[in-house]
Amino acid sequence: MIIKGNITRNLLLCSSYWMISRSTGARALIFVVGLEKIYAVSTARSKEASKQTKFQAVNDGRRGRLGCDGSVLIDSTKNNTAEKDAPPNQTLRGFGAIERIKRTIEHACPNTVSCADVLAIAARDSVVMSKGPNWPVWLGRRDGRVSIANETKQLPPPTANFTRLTQMFGAKGLSIKDLVVLSAGHTIGTSHCSAFSDRLYNFTGKVNLNDIDPLMDTQYISRMRTRCSLTDNTTLVEMDPGSFKTFDTSYYKFVAKGRGLFHSDASLLANSFTKDYVFKHANGFESEFYQDFADSMISMGNVGVLTGNQGEIRKKCYIINN
Ligand code: HEM
């Protein structure tokens, strides 16, 4: 059974989660993301290392039924390649931060809080800490015991067009509005050049400098080319330049100008409803967007949840019990 969580209850249940956040100075920026994805971005300054780590996690495959069951956290074994090692997830970071939170919680209240719930709470708190909206997180998700790399094919790629995006969201019970609202998760974080360099070079396979994605602003293309060569797969680019650590509406400003980084971002201008939403929120209406984002995050956080006797409460997020 899923129960509605709030800060007080979380504090009572798992005060150690908050302690670890404070003691490490962790500034988790974690989002429950696209369809069944959970991306997490965390900037953590640990006492030992004082270094920044970034976390991003994508969730979850379970026998073709993707859902929020923490399966992206599971490591591959010699007999199984897990989601975490599938191409779309190879850029994910910060698994250690979640593992540390889980370890502390497990110490204080064993067999109680699932890794899936840890991710969902951290996602919400991360947005709040980035000056974004707050929302109630229903708790009681259980962890999946299956993680199959091949199932990440169900995740939308950055090259997806509007039709494909709506199909993939729709397959999870998420609406066109959820798509345009949740895409603004790209107000936070960075992307590798390789996720969008096809838009800058040889977009249709012609090898000439004019073969670019027509949906991207040409000045922006020139700027991005100075950052990303055709073969660059290591450089990170801010998705929302100027405020990539702050949750705000400037993502929509960029998309409205043809400066969304991914083809999927640009696709939001291909439909009248999503286009109107982008242009409206490029000009403000922040509180409406915040409420919409909170609502859509709740919807996405309820996709494919395991409850009751399904799955388990993993002791360690990277490995199933037994
Ligand atoms: C609509 C479908 C989506 C697609 C195709 C997509 C695609 C991507 C890609 C390709 C990256 C860059 C990964 C990398 O190079 O490291 C990325 C990053 C990111 N996405 Fe999405 N995304 C989608 C939806 C979402 C949603 C719904 C959210 C949040 C609600 C979100 C939040 C993020 C964040 C925070 C990052 C930055 C991660 C970091 O800084 O490490 N995305 N996304």
Image: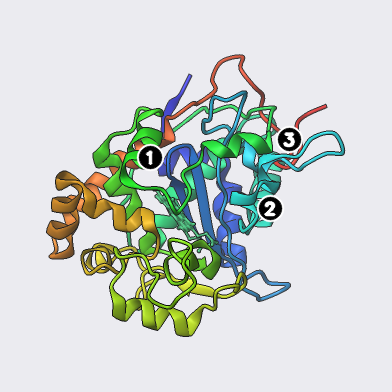
Residue 185 appearing in the image: no
Q: Earlier in the sequence, mark 1 or mark 3?
A: 1
Is 161 placed left or right of 191 in the picture?
left
Q: Label 3, on which residue? A: 315
Q: Residue furthest top?
A: 309
Q: Position of residue 260 (x, y in %)?
A: 33, 64
Residue 100's disc is 2
Label 1 environment density (alpha carbons within 10 Å; few <14, some 14–19, many ≥20): some
Q: Which of marks 2 and 3 precedes in the sequence? A: 2
Mark 2 vs mark 1: in front: 1
Q: How is the image coloured?
A: rainbow
Q: Which amino acid type corresponds to the residue marked 1 in the rendered image? A: Arg
Q: CA distance from mark 1 to mark 3?
A: 37 Å
Cα separation, mark 3 vs mark 2, equals: 12 Å
Distance from Cα at disc 2 to Cα at disc 1? 37 Å
- Mark 3 and mark 1 in contact (Cβ < 8 Å)? no
Q: On the rendered image, what quadrant is the C terminus found in?
A: top right
| Residue at which label 1 appears | 164
Name which residue lies at 65% across and 75% down: 51
Q: Nearer the viewer, residue 196 or 32?
A: 196
